[in-house]
Image (cartoon, coloured by chain):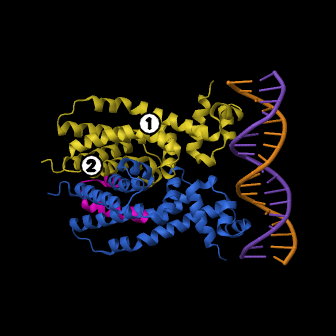
Chain colours: A yellow, B blue, C purple, D orange
DNA sequence: GTCTATACTACGATAGAC
DNA sequence: GTCTATCGTAGTATAGAC
């Protein structure tokens, strides 16, 4: 029962070429296993795809869990504390978008955003919803002047600023005039994102 | 020489299934043409793909041209005028991200962002660079306190807020608790985006 | 210029030995 | 539980009629 290498290769290949573009032959070969072991362990190509989605959801949860578990646990009593945690959460998300080792996950997820299948359900419920709902709850406390819908819209726009670092990576590199995002550029982008969020959260505070 | 239906179908199929997932058989069949006419007109699958990218770039340029030609032509003399045009440009971009008829283009482009090929060059130079550089130039005037790199980073984060409306569409719907983005929600998101941009541009103006 | 017919390759699934 | 062998299908490209 050693199906993990198969799963790792599947995440890479599905992320890189999409469900239809990736081939079970190639996945099996790169994993050093027979093609038929995919049928045995996962029931077929689709089962392997869903298992890959579950694994990505677990990976993201594990990576983010400490941060937003702390955010949930912290007794947040003031607006300033809420803003502080919002900045930490969005920065954590941005860091995840910038980490090289989340590239394959991101490819997989973005494909699912374009054409959601059952895999998107698993990704959303397992990895995105906890972060999003934690964020929305805190944002409601930081901007009590906004109603629920506006709070949710604002949360999405915040995450959009981090998302572009992955989903628009090629354009980011072109606009910045670089080949890849080095550490200095990553820090510059993160700092600018934090400044934006801070600016918007502080609006009307004075 | 009526290769346009072939090209329209190609944009749809490549956008929906990716380069490897789309099949020339299906594209030819849906266009009511023989498979071999793809070879005749475009040299093969790859030629058809690049031609599709060129057509998308043209479409975007035509859609945005009036707006940012006006922005370039306008004699912008004050910071307030620069901010006014920046708001119009980003809102125009957001509207494009929300329009149903740009969905297929967006799918195609986002796939190219993940894995840039020669098609990305054509898209960037033909459609994205003009908008991005116009935006950066205006942003430099609105935020003279920032240096070039920071201005470019800020521009990217602004576009990220609009990009999420397409690239993260499935998550947007989940977080907002809706099936598809109706007009009210679209207006809400656009208004919130304009408010964000306005807030950040006005920072330190007082 | 557009078609049909076909060559050749790669796909996913499965049967059956071990 | 993992392998090899093979089946049937679908992919791109091309040759050649019209």
Above or below for A198 versus B123: above
Q: Position of residue A142 (x, y in %)?
A: 21, 43
Question: Hey, which residue is sitting farthest left in the picture?
Answer: A206
**Left or right: where A192 falls relative to A57:** left
Near-viewer residue (A179 or C4)? C4
Q: Where is residue B4 in the image (x, y as percent from the top left)?
A: 61, 72
The part of the chain drawn in magenta is B129-152
Q: Where is residue B203 in the image (x, y as percent from the top left)?
A: 20, 54
Distance CA(mark 2)–CA(mark 1): 23 Å
Q: Residues within 10 Å of mark 2 (few under 14, many from 20)?
A: some
Q: Is mark 2 on a helix, strand or loop?
A: helix
Residue of label 1: A126
Q: Residue at 28% across / 44% down in the picture? A: A194
Give the quarter of the image for residue B166.
bottom left
Q: Residue at 50% across / 40% down in the picture? A: A105
Residue A177 visible in the shown view: no
Task: Quadrant for the N terminus of chain A, please.
Answer: top right
Dot label at residue A148 = 2
Above or below for A51 versus A171: above
**Left or right: where B38 falls relative to A176:** right
Near-viewer residue (B29 or A165)? B29
| Mark 1 chain | A
Q: Are marks 2 and 1 on the same chain?
A: yes
Q: Position of residue A156 (x, y in %)?
A: 34, 49
């Amino acid at each position: 029962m050693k199906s993990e290498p198969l799963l790792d290769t599947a995440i890479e290949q599905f992320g890189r070429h999409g469900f239809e573009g990736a081939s079970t032959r190639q996945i099996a070969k790169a994993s050093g296993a027979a093609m038929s072991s995919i049928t045995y362990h996962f029931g077929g190509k689709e089962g392997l795809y869903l298992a890959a989605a579950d694994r990505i959801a677990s990976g993201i949860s594990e990576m983010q869990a400490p941060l937003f578990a702390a955010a949930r646990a912290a007794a947040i009593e003031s607006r300033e504390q809420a803003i502080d945690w919002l900045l930490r959460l969005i920065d954590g998300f941005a860091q995840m978008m910038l980490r090289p080792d989340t590239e394959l996950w991101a490819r997989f997820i973005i494909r699912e955003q374009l054409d959601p299948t059952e895999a998107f359900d698993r990704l959303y419920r397992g990895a995105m919803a906890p972060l999003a709902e934690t964020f929305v709850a805190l944002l409601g406390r930081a901007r009590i002047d906004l109603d629920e819908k506006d709070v949710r819209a604002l949360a999405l726009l915040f995450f959009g600023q981090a998302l572009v670092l992955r989903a628009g990576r090629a354009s980011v590199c072109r606009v910045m005039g670089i080949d890849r995002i080095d550490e200095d550029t990553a820090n510059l982008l993160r700092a600018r994102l934090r400044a934006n969020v801070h600016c918007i959260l502080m609006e009307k505070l004075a």
